[in-house]
Image (cartoon, helix red, strand yellow):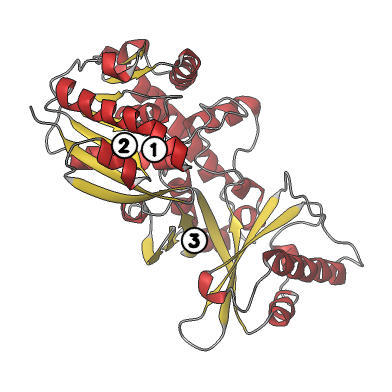
């Protein structure tokens, strides 16, 4: 492909999809609009058009998306057989190389479940179509499947067609490889009860709802655990990119942090120079912002009765390079904490309880939470994420707003409380 042709195609918009936790779509839309044009907003994500380098910049800067996909095919089908027959005709060797491994993930929407009941079968059909296409092109040779650490991840989505009878099968390339919520400040193997991009959404909601505040906005978490809410709030207010640590590590170790760097479309469009320049720019911006904030006053206050969890939080701040004077972590029960600023927000993700006996045991915790907020944190605003209405009633305060959010499959509410004396 000539340089002139590559340059022309670099400016041609492509279709992308950004997935995110349900309930975050409006906030995600605000992010996407900085880089492209919205085509469709649906539960769990946004379809948009953008020129390739702007879509990649969105991927590197988004705090809310879970993954970003590039749409490569869209078929109208009536049956599983149609999927194979349409897919086998595609020149898949122009999508990825024979020596690259691949895997397929499949999602069937609720309205299509009666017709397509087996996701694994659909994945196998698409895999067979791809393999047969390669065999025809390379004298019987085909790429290998790797379900653990593939070079290429293809996402198949089947949904009911709105324009005519039948179904739409959309095939996309996962540009990320691993979830964008994996910021890099978590230790390997650590599992937090809150995904980082959902924590970022909660932090962003609290900032959006704050009518007037100093910069930065003082933030408390009185049962911070491993500190996800505090870390995400700090990154937003300081201006540390969510991809900062992953990019910094990849530059230092000369490793490719995202799958789009392995893709043929990326290679054909000759985007390497622009993409690596952008990645270096983001790292330098984050380092610059971390340097600027060294003279700020403490604005992050975390407490928990679990010393090990507090140590995980501390390591998270240290790995990001956030100056120690900006955060204060204390080993205390919630009822023993006190506010240290005249204004600010409190972000809480208390245990929800899954079984009746757990819910009953947590009632006292929620009562103590309400009493502590009312007695010791007046003039601040609290945001509490909960999935259990029975427990939220135990807080004993009247919420001023409710934001529906999903924590994984849990239907939750982020409750806002204006705390007055």
Mark 2 and mark 1: span between their CA atoms? Answer: 6 Å
| Looking at the image, residue 397 lies above or below residue 238 | below
Residue 352 appearing in the image: no
Q: Position of residue 58 (x, y in %)?
A: 43, 48
For the point 30% across and 37% down, which residue is it?
Answer: 384
Name the quadrant containing residue 124: bottom right
Mark 3 and mark 1: span between their CA atoms? Answer: 24 Å
Q: Which residue is mark 3?
A: 16
| Looking at the image, residue 90 lies above or below residue 42 | below
In front: label 3 or label 1? 1
For the point 79% across and 54% down, which residue is it?
Answer: 145
Quadrant in the picture for the N terminus: bottom right
- On residue 199, the disc is 1
In front: label 2 or label 3? 2
Q: Circles 2 and 1: CB distance less than 8 Å?
A: yes
Q: Which residue is mark 2?
A: 203
For the point 49% across and 19% down, which residue is it?
Answer: 312
Q: Secondary structure under badge 1?
A: helix
Position of 29 with respect to 419 (left or right) is right
Pointer 2 local density, CA inside 10 Å: few below 14, some 14–19, many at least 20 = many
Position of 199 with respect to 300 (left or right) is right
């Amino acid at each position: 492909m000539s340089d002139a042709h590559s340059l022309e195609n670099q400016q041609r918009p492509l279709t992308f999809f950004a997935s995110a936790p349900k309930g975050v779509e409006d906030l995600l839309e605000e992010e996407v609009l900085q880089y492209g044009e919205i085509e469709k907003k649906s539960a769990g994500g946004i379809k948009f058009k953008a020129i390739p380098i702007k879509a990649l910049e969105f991927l590197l800067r988004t705090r809310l998306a879970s993954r970003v996909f590039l749409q490569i095919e869209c078929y109208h089908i009536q049956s599983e057989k149609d999927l194979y027959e349409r897919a086998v005709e595609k020149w898949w060797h122009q999508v990825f190389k024979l020596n690259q491994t691949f895997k397929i993930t499949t999602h069937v929407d609720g309205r299509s479940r009666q017709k397509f009941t087996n996701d694994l079968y659909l994945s196998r059909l698409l895999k067979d179509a791809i393999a047969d296409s390669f065999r025809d092109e390379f004298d019987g040779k085909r790429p290998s499947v790797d379900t653990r650490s593939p070079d290429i991840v293809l996402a198949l989505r089947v949904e009911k067609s709105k324009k005519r009878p039948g179904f739409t099968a959309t095939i996309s390339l996962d540009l990320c490889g691993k979830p964008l919520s994996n910021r890099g400040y978590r230790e390997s193997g650590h599992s937090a009860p809150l995904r980082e991009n959902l924590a970022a959404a909660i932090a962003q909601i609290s900032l959006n709802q704050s009518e007037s505040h100093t910069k930065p906005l003082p933030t408390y978490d009185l049962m911070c655990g491993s500190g996800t809410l505090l870390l995400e709030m700090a990154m937003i207010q300081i201006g540390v990119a969510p991809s900062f640590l992953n990019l910094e590590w990849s530059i230092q170790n000369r490793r490719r942090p995202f799958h789009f760097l392995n893709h043929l479309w990326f290679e054909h469009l000759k985007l390497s120079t622009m993409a690596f320049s952008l990645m270096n720019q983001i790292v330098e911006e984050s380092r610059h912002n971390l340097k600027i904030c060294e003279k700020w006053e403490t604005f992050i206050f975390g407490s928990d009765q679990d010393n090990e969890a507090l140590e995980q939080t501390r390591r998270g701040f240290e790995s990001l390079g956030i100056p120690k004077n900006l955060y204060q972590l204390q080993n205390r029960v919630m009822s023993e904490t006190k506010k240290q600023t005249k204004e600010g927000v409190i972000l809480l993700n208390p245990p929800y309880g899954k079984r009746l006996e757990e819910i009953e045991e947590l009632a006292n915790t929620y009562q103590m939470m309400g009493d502590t907020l009312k007695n010791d944190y007046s003039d601040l605003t609290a945001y509490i994420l909960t999935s259990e209405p029975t427990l939220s009633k135990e807080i004993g305060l009247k919420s001023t707003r409710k934001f529906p959010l999903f924590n994984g499959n849990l239907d939750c509410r982020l409750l806002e409380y204006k705390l007055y004396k």
